[in-house]
Amino acid sequence: MNKLLGKLAGMLLALTLSTGLAAAQSKITIAVGGGACLCYLPTVLAKQLGEYDKAGLAVELVDLKGGSDALKAVLGGSADVVSGYFDHCVNLAAKKQELQAFVVYDRYPGLVLVVSPKHTGEINSIKDLAGKKVGVSAPGSSTDSFLKYLLKKNGLDPTGTAVIGVGLGATAVAAMEQGQIDAAVMLDPAVTVLQGSYKDLKILSDTRTQHDTLAVFGGEYPGGALYSTAAWVNGHEKEVQALTNAIMATLAWIHSHSAEDIMAKMPDELVGKDRAQYLAALKNTIPMYSETGKMDPKGAEAVLAVFSEGSPDVAKAGIDVTKTYTNKFVDQVKKTTGNAK
């Protein structure tokens, strides 16, 4: 009888603890601008590693077609936080919508302008894209902004090129292979998948490395980050700190493990059938992931400069770019977890 009572007491204690843990966890919805893209891997990997749970958060990841859709989810109230490109924070500041990034996980944007294999012979430079159909993840997304920047930089009117939303994963690869579009702004693993099938794949612009990013933008250019409205960030500092802790722990894990280890943790549906190509793309991408989580002020200024060149509204808005991000939560990570560098 004593043994039975002991077991019952143990079960009751376990139930109480688990119920208490669930009650203590804050529920957060993160809208991801294309979960299959390696640029967003830290957000997904944090879930796979259980880092959100460790930080006291019950996180739901909502996978959307592109960064603009993820942004709409937050502005519309159906998600709390965007996992997307920081440049949206700058772009929206021109429209008096205050967004703030609080942890950066991509040092470089990783955007690549690729010519469709079926149109390799007729397109040799960005100038040749005049009047062509070019794929982006979704109109208004960072891929779209990057395209417009490159077109204008090369003396073309961005409105003279048709922009087609094709997503970031298999749909983008299919559109390129079938020749539905003439070129596309893509990210890994999709770029590496195409390179594996077409050895003569023509790349017009590439920002997967520091060298290439500097060549395109003239400076560091941050890519993916977690951000939300400034009002939400200010009103949910505990949750923002917990999210930052989780992403920082994940970045530390990434940089202390092999590409094989990382791939093993990722969901099979994101890795896909060709694991060798995914692994190759991942190896190309790992240097892109931040080790500090911090926004480089010069990088933020570079984003503002790019958008000011491409958008008259941004140029004349008098944006204080320092209000579009904060490093205070990253700075607090060491104090709360002891894991920050």
Image (tube, grey):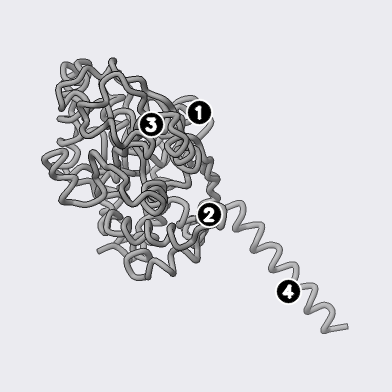
Q: What residue type is labelled 4?
A: Gly
Where is residue 99 drawn, in percent x and y? Answer: 33, 31
Q: How many labels does the image show?
A: 4
Left or right of 86 in this view: 15: right
Query: Marks 4/2: CA distance?
Result: 43 Å
In the rendered image, residue 236, in percent from the top left (x then y), is placed at 42, 40
At label 3, counting other C-alpha atoms closer than 10 Å, the crowd grade (few under 14, some 14-19, many 20 or more) is: many
**Disc number placed over residue 10 in the picture, else none:** 4
Element marked by disc 3: strand
Which secondary structure lies at badge 1?
A: loop
* Circle nearer the viewer, 1 or 2: 2
Residue type marked 1 = Gly
Mark 1, other Cα within 10 Å: few <14 / some 14–19 / many ≥20: few
- Residue denoted by label 1: 77
List the single residue furthest toward the left.
218
Q: In this view, does 93 lie above or below 6?
A: above
Q: Earlier in the sequence, mark 4 or mark 3?
A: 4
Residue 162 appears in the picture as rendered: yes
1 and 2 marks in contact (CB < 8 Å): no
Q: Mark 3 points at which residue?
A: 136
Residue 34 lies, in percent from the top left, at: 46, 41
**Does the rendering let one see residue 80?**
no
Q: Farthest residue to the right: give it.
A: 1
Tag on residue 272?
A: 2
The amino acid sitting under disc 3 is Val
Q: Which of marks 1 and 3 is in front?
A: 3
Q: Amino acid under label 2? A: Gly
- How far apart, in angstroms, are the residues tagged by discs 1 and 2? 32 Å
Q: Which of marks 1 and 2 is nearer the N terminus?
A: 1
Quadrant of the image for the C terminus? bottom left
Which image quadrant is residue 152 in? top left
Disc 1 to disc 3, how far (Cα)?
25 Å
